[in-house]
Amino acid sequence: MRTARAIARANIALAKYWGKSDDATNLPAVPSVSLTLDPLVTETTVTFDPGLDADAFVLDGEPAREGELARVRALLDEVRAASGLTDHARVESANQFPTAAGLASSASGFAALAGAASRAAGLDEPLEVLSARARRASASAARSIWGGVVELPAGEPGDDALSARPLAGPDHWDLRVVVAVTAAGRKPIGSRAAMRQSRTGSPYYDAWVAQSFESARAITEALMERDFDRLAPLVERSFLAMHAVAMTNEEAVIYWQPGSVAALHRVRALRADGVPVCATMDAGPHVKAICVADAADHVQAALEETEGVLRTLVARPGPGLELA
Ligand code: DP6
């Protein structure tokens, strides 16, 4: 038996990934820029075991659903091909944060899986290779291989080795992300299906892709210069443009709930009052308020008392993949 354990963290995109240039190899059509977040940790153990007759995936103590298992198996197949191993594997993964917090556990999950599977198979692969493998499983996971500020460039069909790359470490800028949880239960449609519908169904999809390059460049520059006044409107424009494309799909994917709208207005009112804070949202109803560390208590208190906000949690920039 060969076994290894890895830890990876969730990340929040400030410049959003939404849409693929190739479905089969899961290549993003747009560049994205993220912050890796502590303490939103997933821990994954992979054991290749000659006694198993199929791969098994246990997530938070429960056997995973077939769709999730299929994506895990595809990653394990890549590792078997790279290592020459033929054994099946048991994958045990645990999120040390509530998955209902709306912070993609798939990003931390597939990053940890890419690390643990490679190590368990006896491979000693560079982080770029692990990031590319995580990206093929779930593109946002490519970014969780590194800590701090991370970029995933857009890819063209054929860019099979496309990986994310680190831009600055977790200590670059002492930011906080206050997550305002605004709804319980499952979201109506996952990001993968919704972004596919956006590409085929939204009249604004091409415009979204066209503007994404300048958007990611400007967001990166503001991050590197720690210029919050410049960063804030750019971050909000990126997620609003992404949601505009989702909302104008043929099926009109509206992730927003009343609490989301209330929280967004609250964040913007705080900013108008001089608090360095801005908002972003992923493919779900929760609002993530990004602010400088000094403002975090104030922002959290304001969101806690906003109607429709069920609870909040605070995250900070954290490190990348850790192998044990
Ligand atoms: C809205 O990485 O979950 O969170 O590559 O199909 O697995 P797949 O998509 P996924 O999409 C994340 C989209 C997002 C924005 C982002 O994280 O950049």
Image (tube, rainbow, N blue to C red):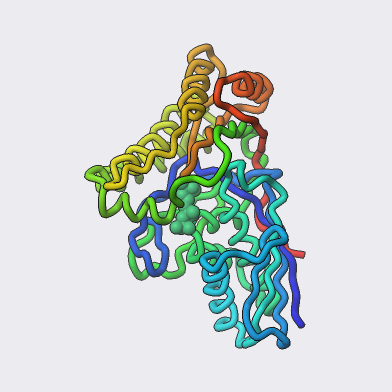
| Outermost residue, front side | 185
Left or right, 5 with respect to 57, comes to: right
Tell me the quadrant of the picture where the N terminus can be found: bottom right
> What residue lies at 61% left-to-right and 44% top-to-bottom?
100
Left or right, 253 with respect to 131, comes to: left
> What residue lies at 70% left-to-right and 58% top-to-bottom?
60
Camera-side residue of 174 and 44: 44
Q: Is residue 91 above or below residue 291?
A: below
Q: Position of residue 54 (x, y in %)?
A: 62, 81
| Outermost residue, top side | 273
In this view of the protein, can residue 3 be seen by the observer?
Answer: yes
Tell me the quadrant of the picture where the C terminus can be found: bottom right
Camera-side residue of 39 and 105: 105
> What residue lies at 63% left-to-right and 48% top-to-bottom?
99
> What residue lies at 52% left-to-right and 25% top-to-bottom?
263
Q: Where is residue 283 in the image (x, y as percent from the top left)?
A: 46, 44
Camera-side residue of 197 and 300: 197
Q: Position of residue 61 (x, y in %)?
A: 72, 61
